[in-house]
Amino acid sequence: MVGSAQFGLSDQWDCHVYAVDSPQGVVMIDAGSGLGEADLAAELAADFPGVSVAGIILTHSHADHSGGAGALRKRFGCTLVTSEETGSILEAGDEERSGLRRAREMGAYPKELRLRNCPVDQTFRSGEQFEVGGRVWNPMRVRGHSNDSYCLLTLIDGHVACFSGDVVFYGGVLGVINAWDSSLQGYVEDLPMLRNSGVEMLLPGHGMFTLKAGQRHIDAALQSLQSGFLPAQIGQGVVIF
Ligand SMILES: [Zn+2]
């Protein structure tokens, strides 16, 4: 982890930002809000001395995950990789579709935070493996938190790691929020894709993570979708940032 508001690594509006050693350099997962860019770069340099950044992959376009993408891409001279959906939002700097304008109005972000448009170098589609930094990634689109939310799976030391963005959190908590493109129905339709994925490391964009038996948390989320009541969601009684 090289950036995080919750763990005090970078700006107070940053999601967890991860970096994983890969054959052609470091690959970052998510970019933070852009407000903690210098802290993030310093943390990265301390954790991976002398190693260059090969790429940044985004889980979705929400500002706490994507805001720093353009500046970090420039700083590191690396490849920015997103889903087709996230890419079209970022390239247009579309604050409506990313939800930023409304979230800002609701006080979820500082007034000065803007989604700056930036070029995307490579896009991916759900279920189609791709390579960044010489490492293979398996993207799974899981709607529910946002229309453009993806889980990114890769093998680390032979174990399945799932960078789950805001799709599924520790304890099986889901990410339905008060936004136009968020719904429980998205989870009902798409989360079963993660059944039997053998996930060891579950590395979400907020809150706790685990390096062992991550599938347990995904299974708990799947189980909660079988209930007639609303499953636990992020932001209910806990501070996210
Ligand atoms: Zn989000």
Image: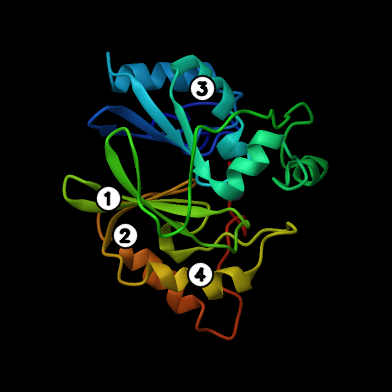
Residue 168 x/y as whole percent:
47, 59
Please report the residue visible at 77 percent of the width from the left and 26 percent of the height from the top: 112
Element at label 4:
helix
Q: Residue under label 4, please give it.
A: 190
Mark earlier in primary sequence (3, 4): 3
- Residue sticking out furthest to the bottom: 228
* Quadrant (top left/top right/bottom left/bottom right) for the C terminus: top right
Mark earlier in primary sequence (1, 4): 4
Instruction: Count residues near mark 3 (Cα–Cα under 10 Å), then give few for <14, some for 14-19, many for 20+.
Output: many
* Cβ atoms under marks 2 and 3 closer than 8 Å: no
Q: Amino acid at mark 1?
A: Leu
Circle nearer the viewer, 2 or 3: 3
Q: Amino acid at mark 4?
A: Asp
Q: CA distance from mark 2 to mark 1?
A: 7 Å
Q: Amino acid at mark 2?
A: Gly
For residue 42, above or below residue 124: above
For residue 92, above or below residue 54: below
Instruction: Tell me the number on the disc at residue 161.
Output: none
In the image, 29 versus 205, the foreground residue is 29
Please report the residue visible at 28 percent of the width from the left and 18 percent of the height from the top: 51
Instruction: Tell me the number on the disc at residue 72.
Output: 3
Residue 214 x/y as whole percent:
31, 59
Q: Colour scheme of this structure image? A: rainbow
Instruction: Count residues near mark 4 (Cα–Cα under 10 Å), then give few for <14, some for 14-19, many for 20+.
Output: some
Element at label 1:
loop
